[in-house]
Image (cartoon, rainbow, N blue to C red):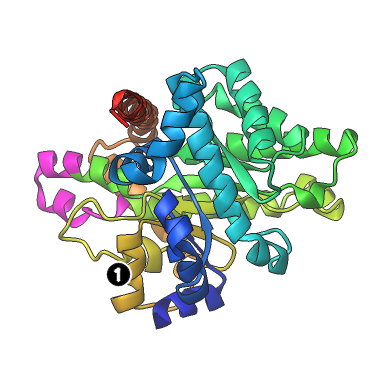
Amino acid sequence: MNALLELTDLGVSIWLDDLDRHRITSGNLAGLIQNKCVRGVTTNPAIFDKAVSAGAEAYAAQINELAAQGKDVDQIIRRLTTDDVRAACDLFTGLWQQSGGVDGRVSIEVDPRLANDTTATMSQARELWTEVARPNVLIKIPATKAGLPAITEAVANGISVNVTLIFAVDRYLEVIAAYEDGLVRAKAAGHDLSAIQSVASFFVSRVDAAVDARLEAIGTPAAQALKGDAAIANARLAWVAYEEALAAPRWAELAECGANPQRPLWASTGVKDPSYDDTRYVVDLATSGCVNTMPEATLEAVGQHGHVIGDTVRGTGSAATSTWQALAELGINQGSVCEQLEVEGVQKFIDSWEQLRRTVQRAMQAPE
């Protein structure tokens, strides 16, 4: 596991992109925290569907009990997921304290069906924050146009936020502004800014999957030479935007008031193309101050054969810009790719949520 230690020493916060009740009760998650440098957890509807499907026995008694109380499927899902996230938060309490509240974080997502409804997203963010009732929870809000004011409102109310489904650097700039607007309002309302944390989740592998398909269709040698370059370049450009935001006068004023930077988080870091090195979205995006949330298979791959060569992000902005200029010359537009991925990403989360509802509905109807 030397590579995991090397990444941690470099300043990368390793989070696990997975959670289920068995991990919590069996000691598995505690073991990952102790032995494999895991410093946080992210969840999403697909993860919870897999958890309930694969661990039916772990959830059956609670589902039956709640169904007997007359709870509907959405109310049951809320209880299952908030209970798991709360329990995971408790496992991270020590690390959360040791890191000054930076790490030891567990994310839970608002219902993705609300992604284009600002008011409903804001309302559910407050509800989840109250129900989990742990200071180290992060409420996941999508970086849709409707999500931006919800991010500001949540932060203004002292809620720590994981902004998810970010693909475009331009949208990320809006996310940064939404976070800072929220901090300004939080300060005016008397909240302690040092207690508010946020990460901005940039999805990585999906960018390569989308761009590689276009390059394959073009089929020229120039196109083939660019396969696998888009996603890492996109993330590195996001880091440039992050550094520029931290250098701005507005951030300096907020930092003086105790505000925490909204760390870039690399998500979707499992490779989609099996021909690619299964550690590339970790070791090629390693830099101090970032978060990398990875499925367990990727975590194990990095631990077993990841080759950490130091910081692979800072100072790469010019090369990343050149990559996207070359893609543009082939007719691949960065903005249109990211816009399509956002639309598809929202729909995928909605589909996973509906699948989770069907899974729980079947469990409610199963004989005891």
**Number of numbered discs overlaid on the protein picture:** 1
Which amino acid type is marked by label 1? Ala
Vertical order, 342 against 297 (above or below): above
Dominant secondary structure of the residues highlighted in magenta in the image: helix
| Residue 215 belongs to magenta span | yes
Residue sitting at 9 percent across and 45 percent down?
Answer: 219
Please give the name of the residue rendered at 64% of the width and 24% of the height, measured from the top-left corner. 122
Q: Give the quadrant of residue 112.
A: top left
Q: Quadrant of residue 279?
A: bottom left
Q: Residue 327 appears at what percent x and percent y?
A: 28, 45
Q: Position of residue 77 (x, y in %)?
A: 46, 30
Give the residues in magenta. 213-230
Decide: is 301 above or below 184: below
| Residue 49 or residue 264, whichever sits in front | 49
User: Which residue, as the protein is rendered here, is positioned at the far bottom?
Assistant: 2
x, y percentage for residue 139?
60, 39
Where in the figure is residue 202, as x and y percent of width and height? 46, 46
**Which residue position holds label 1?**
301
Whether residue 104 is visible to the viewer of this picture, yes or no, is no
Residue 32 position (above or below residue 251): below
Q: Is residue 356 left or right of residue 84?
A: left
Which quadrant is the N terminus positioned in?
Answer: bottom left
Judge left or right: residue 166 versus residue 283.
right
